[in-house]
Image: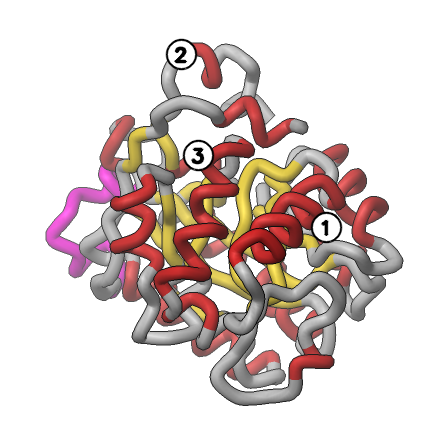
């Protein structure tokens, strides 16, 4: 399991939230905004694309964007392994996109192997372990939907403990303001990151461009930002908007996979996680 390369203590170095104007009006120097120009002060954007695994619209377009992505693959679906293998081949980070119970909506929307709050402890663990085994090259996990599950301490304690044991980090998609992930992760001792902005919660290119402007604002006073988009109904619109925005954004920050937002101890850095 590729994720085991991340076993051991990971050190986070992430600051989030803020607002961005232009380099001329930014109190930070232009050098600080240039990727790689000043080491630790260079800006970083991690784009996570959810819902791979079912041959959804925009899959090929997303995988072939000229940036490093984090590809979130749902388990137990027709193209789960194919999408994970292709993402890994192209040098993207792969994470498990774990279906979790929402506050609203039908359970059959979640797909197979979902985590629901009525499951006993042992079944939650079994489903998380099976999902991790199903997605090749996974180095982490995030939640698909999950506004109810991520607000449940019992459920998330099991999910996060299992991730820790398997050497995976956890990205909180923040589908609920009631999320208990930060508190439980601290208790369990697993490293987590969290989403800052959904790019395509409305399925239009215009909205995605508007959300990309929000990404720019978030980077004004912060060195790093995580944004989540999707394949599926919005896949072509999102990939098209991202492609058009990449040249401008590359002048302000480096596009990186999630692992670049973690300071890895020497044994893991030596295995090439930063060289892809």
**Quarter where residue 14 is shown:** top left
Q: In this orientation, which residue lies closer to the viewer: 218 or 150? A: 150
Query: What predominant SS class does the magenta segment belong to?
Result: loop
Q: Is residue 231 left or right of residue 55?
A: left
The mark nearer the N terminus, 1 or 2, is: 1
Distance between the Cα atoms at labels 2 and 3? Answer: 14 Å
Distance between the Cα atoms at labels 1 and 2? Answer: 29 Å
State the image coordinates of residue 205 (x, y, percent, origin top left): 60, 79
State the image coordinates of residue 214 (x, y, percent, origin top left): 36, 70
Q: For the residue labelled by badge 1, is the local secondary structure a helix, a strand or a loop?
A: helix
The mark nearer the N terminus, 2 or 3, is: 3
State the image coordinates of residue 66 (x, y, percent, origin top left): 64, 46
Query: Where the C terminus falls, by quadrant?
Result: top right
Residue 89 vs 114, above or below: the answer is above
Q: For the residue labelled by badge 2, is the local secondary structure a helix, a strand or a loop?
A: helix
The mark nearer the N terminus, 3 or 1, is: 1
Q: Is residue 193 magenta?
A: no
Query: Where the N terminus falls, by quadrant?
Result: top right
The residue carrying mark 1 is 63
The answer to whether one can see residue 90 in this image is yes
Q: In this orientation, which residue lies closer to the viewer: 1 or 36? A: 1
Q: How many marks?
A: 3
Looking at the rendering, the stretch of residues picked out in magenta corresponds to 21-34
Label drawn at residue 260: 3
Label drawn at residue 266: 2
Question: Closer to us: mark 1 or mark 2?
Answer: 2
**Quarter where residue 54 is shown:** bottom right
For the point 65% across and 87% down, which residue is it? 106
């Amino acid at each position: 399991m590729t994720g085991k390369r991340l076993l051991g203590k990971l050190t986070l170095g992430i600051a989030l939230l803020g607002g961005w104007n232009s380099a001329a009006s930014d109190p930070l120097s232009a050098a600080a905004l240039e990727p790689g120009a000043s080491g630790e002060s260079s800006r970083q954007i991690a784009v996570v694309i959810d819902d791979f695994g079912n041959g959804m619209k925009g899959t090929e377009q997303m995988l072939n964007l000229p940036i490093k992505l984090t590809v979130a693959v749902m388990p137990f679906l027709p193209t789960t392994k194919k999408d994970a293998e292709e993402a890994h081949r192209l040098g993207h980070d792969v994470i498990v996109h774990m279906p979790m119970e929402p506050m609203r909506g039908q359970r059959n929307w979640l797909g197979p192997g979902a985590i629901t709050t009525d499951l006993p402890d042992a079944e939650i663990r079994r489903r998380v372990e099976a999902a991790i085994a199903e997605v090749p090259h996974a180095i982490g996990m995030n939640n698909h939907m999950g506004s109810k599950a991520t607000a449940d301490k019992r459920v998330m304690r099991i999910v996060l403990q299992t991730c820790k044991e398997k050497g995976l980090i956890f990205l909180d998609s923040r589908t609920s303001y009631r999320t208990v992930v930060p508190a439980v992760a601290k208790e369990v001792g697993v490293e987590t990151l969290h989403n800052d902005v959904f790019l395509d919660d409305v399925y239009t290119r215009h909205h995605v461009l508007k959300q990309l402007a929000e990404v720019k604002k978030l980077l004004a006073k912060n060195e790093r930002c995580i944004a989540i988009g999707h394949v599926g109904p919005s896949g072509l619109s999102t990939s098209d908007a991202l492609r058009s925005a990449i040249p401008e954004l590359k002048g302000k920050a480096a596009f990186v996979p999630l692992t670049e937002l973690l300071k890895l101890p020497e044994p893991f850095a030596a295995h090439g996680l930063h060289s892809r």
